[in-house]
Amino acid sequence: MGDVVKSLVAGTDGRLPLMLLALTAVTGIVDAVSILALGRVFVANMTGNVVFIGFAVAGAAGFSLAASLCGLGGFLVGAGAGGRLIARLGPDRSRLFAVAVTIELLLFAIATLVVRLSASSSGTGRRDVAVAMGTQNAVARHLAVPDLTTTVLTMTLTGLASDLRHGSREGLVRRLLAVLSMFAGAVVGATLVLQQSPTTALVTGSALLAIVVATSWNASRSANRDGR
């Protein structure tokens, strides 16, 4: 296990791959909460959400057009906000990431409070988390760490299978960890929703995010010191 961690942090990205894996786990938690408790809609995976919108338009039972559109709209707002952050902080990768995950944590905290106080406000909680996921996705896309998009796994799984015999060990390990991170997040999120409450699941996701925030600011300060 130690060799795996060393291989992840040995490159120019430092601790960033580990933090992106943590965000991938958060994605699993978030979509578990949203699918199971906030209106059967994705807030991180927009491929699935667009398909759900199609189901709702076709009149399939159990799919809400309003909920899916709310998730999609929130995600796009977040992605737009992420784009503005990138325009301002893009050259400073460590600070960009730290600011983005801090904003994400604040949005998670608001969503958790809203869901805790009123189940009827689940739309507001859904929107806030979708905005957070949009921001996360935009910044992860800009950082472009291979196979660590944090919200989708289609190409990661494709690379894992197609390069199984000829790919680098580091690449295969990174892809496998990305899949396992989202799977673990989904299991934890679903278990907490089903056995305790959506709020507990969101608190767990927020706690993991808080660790990422603290680590990212520490990495940003270190990068600035090294830069000077």
Image: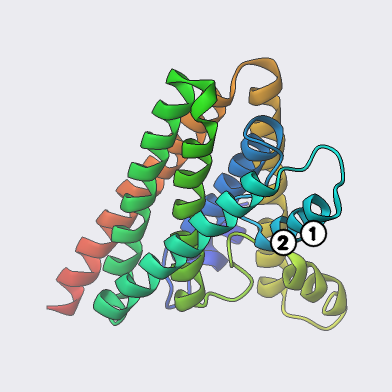
Circle 1 or circle 2, nearest the eye: 1
Disc 2 residue type? Answer: Val
For label 2, the SS is helix
Picture coordinates of residue 201 (x, y %)? Answer: 56, 29
31 up-or-down from 163: above or below: above
Q: Nearer the viewer, residue 198 or 114?
A: 114
Judging by the rendered image, the residue that carries numbered circle 1 is 54
Q: Secondary structure at mark 1?
A: helix
Percent coordinates x, y for residue 197 in the rendering: 59, 19
Amino acid at the residue labelled 1: Gly
The answer to whether any part of residue 18 appears in the image is: no
Q: Looking at the image, do the residues carrying marks 1 and 2 touch, with CB atoms under 8 Å apart?
A: yes
Q: Give how far across and how far down residue 117 sits, in percent.
A: 43, 19
Mark 2 burial class by Cα count in 10 Å: few <14, some 14-19, many 20+: some
Q: Tell me the residue that label 2 is attached to.
A: 50
Horizontally, residue 104 falls left or right of residue 43, namely left
The residue sitting at 81% across, 37% down in the picture is: 62
Point out which mark residue 124 bears: none
Residue, x 18% and y 71% (percent of image)?
224
Q: Position of residue 219 (x, y in %)?
A: 29, 61
